[in-house]
Image (cartoon, coloured by chain):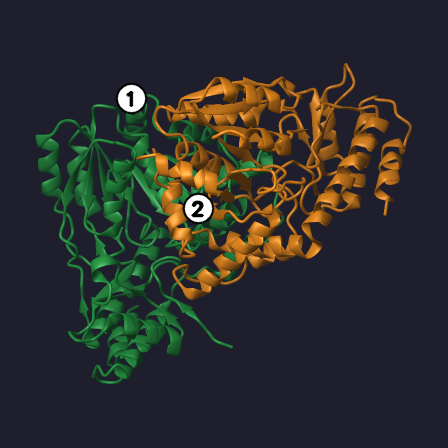
Chain colours: A green, B orange
Amino acid sequence: MRKEYLLTPGPSQVPAEVLLRMAEPVFHHRTPRFMDMYKALVEKLRKVFMTAADVLVFASSGTGAMEASVVNLVPKGKKALAIESGKFGERWTEICRAFGVAHDVIQVEWGKAVNPDDVAAKLAADKDIVAVYATLVETSTGVEHPIKELGAAVAKTGAILVVDGISGAGASELRVDDWNVDVLVVGSQKALMLPPGLAVLTVGPKAKALLEQVKNPPAYYFDLKAALKAAGKADTPYTPALTLMLALDTAVSSLLEEGMENVFKRHDKYARAARAGMNALGLAVYPERPATALTAVLVPDGVDAEAVRKTAQKKYGAALAGGQDKLKGVLIRMAHMGYVGPMDIVIGLAALEMSLADHGVKAVPGAGVAAAEAVLREP
Amino acid sequence: MRKEYLLTPGPSQVPAEVLLRMAEPVFHHRTPRFMDMYKALVEKLRKVFMTAADVLVFASSGTGAMEASVVNLVPKGKKALAIESGKFGERWTEICRAFGVAHDVIQVEWGKAVNPDDVAAKLAADKDIVAVYATLVETSTGVEHPIKELGAAVAKTGAILVVDGISGAGASELRVDDWNVDVLVVGSQKALMLPPGLAVLTVGPKAKALLEQVKNPPAYYFDLKAALKAAGKADTPYTPALTLMLALDTAVSSLLEEGMENVFKRHDKYARAARAGMNALGLAVYPERPATALTAVLVPDGVDAEAVRKTAQKKYGAALAGGQDKLKGVLIRMAHMGYVGPMDIVIGLAALEMSLADHGVKAVPGAGVAAAEAVLREP
């Protein structure tokens, strides 16, 4: 017997009720029963993301929905603007490149958040840009970008704002309509408390208007026009991932029962508790604008983050994430989104505390957990 | 309480063991645990499809993997050859069109099977054709195409054979390597006894060589080169649909336990039983080369197939499929692939028999079931 604690930024923990929902007998998707389920699910997703926009559900990982939001929304002769600030922001650029979509890039230093003024300046200088591709939570660095301010800046222009909210949407505060997010991409295996395999996309009116200007996009499985047309009839162009959709219904129902404002507050509290605990362990929070969905910290000089992470996993059963690409070996990332409670923060910090001690990092025993508890005890 | 019997050609029935496998706690996919599972799954899939080829698993419906096999395999200046014989064959053409892939089409009358000589003639006449896109079971008409003969014909040329085996692979006899199938596309929700949401693709050596000739394909999520590279390390380029993969492992393990030769024989027997029963009910089998995965029949003149189908569903709980597009209202389709036993044939025929009687179609009561039983009783 070995008890494992999943604290990685995707996949995240899935409640037993959600897992068991997938064990329901499969039924056909071209039926009133499916249509009723689908309509109810869309209404719930609208409430979770605070939008009146169209909502699409794809059988794919979040990356598939990112691809959909690039290939369908940039007319020939126009441009995308990709904001890169880590591995996931770079994905926007990679998708543009794969499909020959003309694009400009804003490079943000890893660990930093984008400055909305820089985006506004780019948009003012280049009228060919029709869509800005941003990231809510750059999971590779732990930065949460200022989407509200970015949305306000982009909304003043003719361009749309597309946000990769794969990591964070449903945990971090995010108000799609109020914040002028025209397209939101979400993956199932993060704050939505589902296993991987499903992507959700919201498509607002400004994005729908742009969609009409794109003739013959390089898309079939991810053809947004076809998907929107089918969605209007509570249908999907291709066979939907039924069991994951049923599970999603269970998961978002529990989010709505809690209430999104409470969901946001809960995650904010856990994030503050995690940061307080990390600081008490002598670990510096890496990003300048830390996410509510996960906390990324630097280990002290001379310590191998990968070794610490592996000990936490092997000896104490806590699955944390390391750094990616250039941050491998220096960063440790702990997720606190979705199906998490105060004890997940305690578990993560205790595992790190013990593992750090095992690797010769001196800290006051219990200091990490104690610092977190001071936050967790807040009403 | 209402007991339902799922006899549609996808989704199909899923064994409880497979459904419950999805309720296992989620774990991270960049781990030795995932790699071990993935490698074992690939080995099992190779045995199911009788191939030494590379095997890829996508989080998508089967259509996504069809797209992958088009956009990555036709170099600029070369051509695809799509075989159309129904709604699903037409999908090959639609995908070519969506991505601007040059293509020729062989039109086969609905209900008929392709003649491999026609394909050989096209290939001889047009040396630009590098890939032939065929269908194992054209679900819309119930035809099973002669893939073995087609493979033999295509293998004599420089072109590759890509087969949409979404419906039927894992039920109908299909020997990927012996039959010279260079790429096979399979969906999870048919003979593989899984819920929808996963697609499997085999990529043989001739296809891999062709892949190398395609520079900058319009692909990202469905980039085959990236997927093959990751698969070589028991990894996936993007987050895999873990729970469905675990379920697939359970499902294919049970196929292999039965043994593929026995699986083929079982399905062949059910198909013959279904056809015998349908004929005894006065329903003519529609396709000229009927599939082992499903049986498509014409209702007598003056009878509304949709009305019969709806009664079978509503009054007797048997979910059958109707005709699609031009066959709507004239065709009824009953699947017998995957998790089926002799009683599924009995159920389907009895439901149809009663429903036909309800709609005034005279037949000897019990004749359909009796005719099927004569086949089902074979050793």
Q: In the rendered view, does A332 fall on the left or right side of A114?
A: right
**Residue nearer the viewer, B120 or A35:** B120
Q: Secondary structure at mark 1?
A: loop
What's the residue type where badge 1 is placed? Gln
| Circle 1 residues within 10 Å: few <14, some 14–19, many ≥20 | few
Quadrant in which residue A277 is drawn: bottom left
Would you name the residue on which mark 2 appears?
A198
Please tell me whether residue A41 is drawn above or below residue B112 in the rendered image.
below
Left-right relation of B244 to A108: right
Q: Amino acid at mark 2?
A: Leu
Res B22 visible = yes
Residue at x 43% of width, y 25% of height: B96
Residue B105 image point, x, y percent: 51, 19
Rendering coords of residue B63 (x, y %): 49, 35
> Which of pointers 2 and 1 lies earlier in the amino acid sequence?
2
Tally the marks: 2
Estimate the spatial distance between the alpha carbons at disc 2 and disc 1, rounded to whole Å. 28 Å
Toward the top, the furthest residue is B302
User: Badge 2: how crowded within 10 Å, few (<14), some, or many (20+)?
Assistant: many
Q: Which residue is mark 1?
A: A213
